[in-house]
Amino acid sequence: MASTLREELASLKIERSEFIRPARKSDGVIEYRRRGGGLRLLSWMLWLIPLSIIGGAGYVGYREYDRVRSKPKSPLAWSRG
């Protein structure tokens, strides 16, 4: 039983994704680095730019709404207090 388990474990291999590539160091050690860092940054930017524009427009819109809402309608409203 132990020999079959060892054989099964020896036959297992990890399939590396295409986004991970090997990089050799000077001492012969292999490290694996992920690719697509620029793609991840671009993805974040594609989400953050529209969200910041929507947030800024909401802020400006609320400021304008607050300014118009607090404005009295007529001079008589001042005397009614």
Image (cartoon, rainbow, N blue to C red):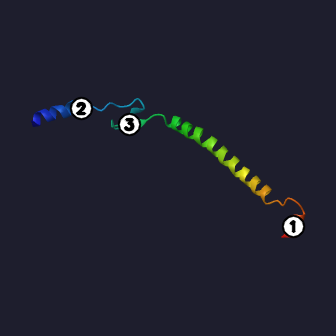
Q: Which mark is residue 78?
A: 1
Point out which mark residue 32 bears: 3
Earlier in the chain: of badge 2 and badge 3, it is 2
Q: Position of residue 51 (x, y in %)?
A: 62, 44
Label located before the other in sequence (2 or 1): 2
Characterize the local packing of mark 1: few (<14), some (14-19) or many (20 or more) Cα atoms within 10 angstroms. few
Q: Which-is-in-front pick, marks 3 and 1?
A: 1
Judge from the rendering whether residue 74 lies leftward or rightward of residue 41; answer left or right.
right
Q: Residue at left 72%, top 53%?
A: 62
Residue 34 - label: none
Q: Position of residue 13 (x, y in %)?
A: 27, 31
Closest to the observer: 51 or 14?
51
Q: Nearer the viewer, mark 2 or mark 1?
A: 1
The residue wearing badge 2 is 12
Q: Quadrant of residue 24?
A: top left
Quick one: quadrant of the C terminus?
bottom right
